[in-house]
Image: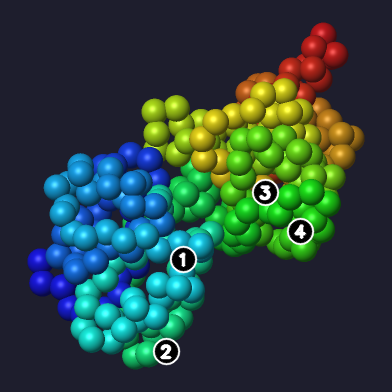
Amino acid sequence: MSLDPGLYVAATPIGNLKDVTYRVIEALAACDLILCEDTRQTAKLCAAYDIRTERRPYHEHNAERVRPDILSRLKKGARICLVSDAGTPLISDPGYKLVREARDAGVRVAPLPGPCAAIAALSAAGAPTDGFLFAGFAPTGNARATFFRRFAQVPASLIFYETGPRLGESLQDMANTFGDRTAVVARELTKIHEEFREGWLSDLAAYYKQQTPKGEIVVVVHPPGREVPSAQEVEAFLSAALDELSVKDAAVAAAEGFGLTRREAYERALRLKAARS
């Protein structure tokens, strides 16, 4: 592959090594240097595809020190690929400063698109996708609730990254701030133990306070407005629907109309049906 001089922002797999694109593999093999968040992590990908290009660390702890040398090499015509441990660089990592300075210096910056945990989770979560906001990791402690309040009225799906030990409390803060919206916890995306767990924020918080999940975690929260109907509204709708539809079909209609999970709508329909008997 012929690779022009410049900085290439290369997306790497978030789990399954087969998710990398041909173009990324070719660029990593043809470039002069690969800048890695962790060279040991990137070494696994390089070993899988027999890539022998020099690798050097570039992360938040050394970025200020090594960036001048990187920019000097780029100005002289070097071909450098920037990767993160997993997914698309600059998404919750500090690479944007290198990109900004490279562009300011007249260096060509080219994206090599591919996996991104936030987009992967959103694509399979069942939340509205016509508008979404990615907010990355929330801060810890008391600052977390303040952080969430910034997004409480955003009329779009919200996407957060989180860690296992913090997940239960973080979900509780979301429930307290956003109201009891529908949410999805996506874990270990593209890996063997991939899991999507959907429910009310309060229920998810209670579940994950009892157990600490492993792996990388994405939380997708549905937009405001549809997810917290009153019990009376849902019951009135289901009561009318059950006059003409089966429990299953009435539940599907309620789920779509009120933003409920299908499980929640089905359980409500069953209770109402049983009360009529």
Q: Where does residue 213 sit, x and y in percent of width and height?
A: 59, 29
Q: Which residue is mark 4?
A: 147
Q: Where does residue 27 sit, x and y in percent of width and height?
A: 20, 64
Q: Which residue is mark 3?
A: 222
SS type, badge 1: loop
**Chain-order first, disc 2 or disc 1:** 1
Q: Is residue 153 above or below residue 255?
A: below
SS type, badge 4: helix
| Callout 1 amino acid | Asn
Return the residue found at the far left.
1
Return the residue found at the far right.
232
Q: Which residue is mark 1?
A: 62
| Callout 3 amino acid | His
Tell me the quarter of the image containing the C terminus. Answer: top right
Label 3 to label 4: alpha-carbon separation? 17 Å
Task: Tell which tag, 1 or 3, sits nearer the viewer.
Answer: 1
Give me the residue at 47% from left, 49% from top: 117
Q: How many marks?
A: 4
**Left or right side of 200 for 98:** left
Q: Which residue is mark 2?
A: 104
Label 2 to label 1: alpha-carbon separation? 21 Å
Q: Are marks 2 and 4 in contact (CB under 8 Å)?
A: no
Q: Where does residue 128 sit, x and y in percent of width and height?
A: 59, 52
Q: Are marks 2 and 3 in contact (CB under 8 Å)?
A: no
